[in-house]
Image (spheres, rainbow, N blue to C red):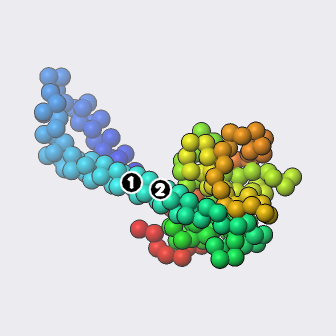
């Protein structure tokens, strides 16, 4: 897809350079249409828009699915609603059920197998990591937006939403990660993602 965009930009630049000084936008549109570039640009534009909608839909699905587990008790090593979840088991189950990706089991492994992003780039469905056990990436949750994340915190607690801006979480923040749709080939894939 980016190859077509580069070709289109190059063709437009060449056409603009070769066009007479008095050429108006109608002439440029006609030139692009004659060369078949306008159709390609529209195809690329539709593909980019479709991809953006797909990503937004997946993020929304992740958050909605995760919210369905509010109140499920914490259980060390747990990875199902029936037995309870620990933090990484919760994240793993949500990604597997929602988008068919099988993430590694431990929080530090999930951090290592996903794309590093800046905290300012966080979008719903991204992963947030914290140092809660005196070691990096010892806790993970799913960002839901507005500075909040959903997670399975600790023994005696249950899946809940918390604010990352609370001093406890701010001091322990280790980083943000994005699970790329292509990550399925790297971390395991249950279903083919379309």
Residue at the outermost right position? 134
In the image, is residue 92 above or below residue 179? below
**Alpha-carbon distance for marks 1 and 2?**
10 Å
> Could you tell me residue 137's position as x and y percent?
76, 55
Q: Nearer the viewer, residue 74 or 2?
A: 74
Q: Which residue is mark 2?
A: 60
Q: Nearer the viewer, residue 100 or 35?
A: 100
Q: Is residue 12 left or right of residue 192?
A: left
Residue at the spot 25% in from the left edge and 49% down from the top edge: 42
Decide: few, some or many residues near mark 1? Use Cα within 10 Å; few <14, some 14-19, many ≥20: few
> Could you tell me residue 143's position as x and y percent?
60, 51
User: On the rendered image, what quadrant is the N terminus found in?
Assistant: bottom left
SS for dot 2: helix
Q: Which residue is mark 1?
A: 53
Q: Is residue 61 left or right of residue 88?
A: left
Give the mark nearer the N terminus: 1 vs 2: 1
Residue at the spot 16% in from the left edge and 38% down from the top edge: 29
Residue at the spot 59% in from the left edge and 65% down from the top edge: 69
Number of the label disc, if any, that sits on residue 126: none
Query: Does residue 185 appear anywhere in the picture?
Result: no
> Could you tell me residue 10's position as x and y percent?
32, 41
| Picture mark count | 2
């Amino acid at each position: 897809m980016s190859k077509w965009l580069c070709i289109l930009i190059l063709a437009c630049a060449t056409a603009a350079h070769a066009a007479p000084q008095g050429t108006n936008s109608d002439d440029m549109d006609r030139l692009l249409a004659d060369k078949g570039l306008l159709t390609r640009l529209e195809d690329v534009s539709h593909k980019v828009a479709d991809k953006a909608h797909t990503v937004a839909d997946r993020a929304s699905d992740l958050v909605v699915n995760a919210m369905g587990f509010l109140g499920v008790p914490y259980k060390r090593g747990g990875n199902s609603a029936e037995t309870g979840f620990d933090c990484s088991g919760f994240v793993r189950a949500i990604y597997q059920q929602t988008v068919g990706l099988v993430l590694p089991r431990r929080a530090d492994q999930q951090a290592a197998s996903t794309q590093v992003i800046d905290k300012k780039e966080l979008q719903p469905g991204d992963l947030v990591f914290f140092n809660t056990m005196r070691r990096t990436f010892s806790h993970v949750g799913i960002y839901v937006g507005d500075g909040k994340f959903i997670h399975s915190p600790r023994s005696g607690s249950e899946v809940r939403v918390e604010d990352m801006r609370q001093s406890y979480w701010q001091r322990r923040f280790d980083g943000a990660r994005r699970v790329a749709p292509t990550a399925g080939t790297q971390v395991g894939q249950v279903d083919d993602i379309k």
